[in-house]
Amino acid sequence: MLGLSTSLISKMILFIVTTTSFTAYIPQVIKLIKTKKSADISILSWLVWLGQYLLMLTYSVIYTTDVWLCLAYLIEFIACLIILLLVIRFKNNKS
């Protein structure tokens, strides 16, 4: 396909997926920081997503040699952790 190798195509797709997924967290972070309220956000959901990213990161480190895949899951894990920490910090904030 257009003279691109399968490896390059897969890396491009991984980059696009990771970038768009990471940028999806930005509006939530901004809203949490601005409002300092998280009463309507489920901690359980974010814990499940955090666990999922941790498991996928662990899997990619142990069973693959793809550094980019490991980096992608690390970025997702960190982004999810940031949201979860903000949600917990502002959970009971009434102001």
Image (tube, helix red, strand yellow):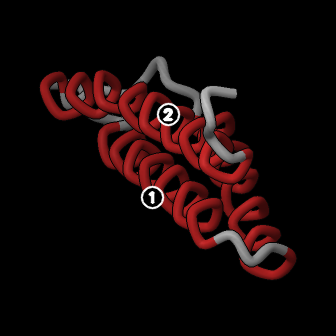
Q: Position of residue 9 (x, y in %)?
A: 64, 40
Q: Quadrant of the C terminus?
A: top left
For the point 42% across and 47% down, the residue is 88
Q: Position of residue 90 (x, y in %)?
A: 30, 39
- Name the one closer to the observer, 69 or 52: 69
The residue indicated by pointer 2 is 16
Q: In which quarter of the image is the N terminus?
A: top right
Determine crowd level at label 2: few under 14, some 14-19, many 20+ residues with C-alpha closer than 10 A: few
The residues tagged by marks 1 and 2 sit, at their Cα atoms, a distance apart of 18 Å
Task: Say which mark, if any, is on residue 27.
Answer: none
For the point 20% across and 31% down, the residue is 36
84 with respect to 66 (left or right): left
Q: Where is residue 75 in the image (x, y as percent from the top left)?
A: 47, 56
In this view, the residue farthest toward the bottom is 62
The residue indicated by pointer 1 is 78
- Name the one closer to the observer, 6 or 83: 6
> Where is 7 relative to 63, above or below?
above
- Name the one closer to the observer, 82 or 15: 15
Ranked by sequence position, the earlier of labels 1 and 2 is 2
Tell me which corner region of the image, top left, top right, bottom left or bottom right, holds residue 62: bottom right
For the point 53% across and 65% down, the residue is 71
45 with respect to 78 (left or right): right
Which amino acid, by three-letter code, is at mark 2? Ile
Q: How many marks?
A: 2
15 with respect to 29 (left or right): right
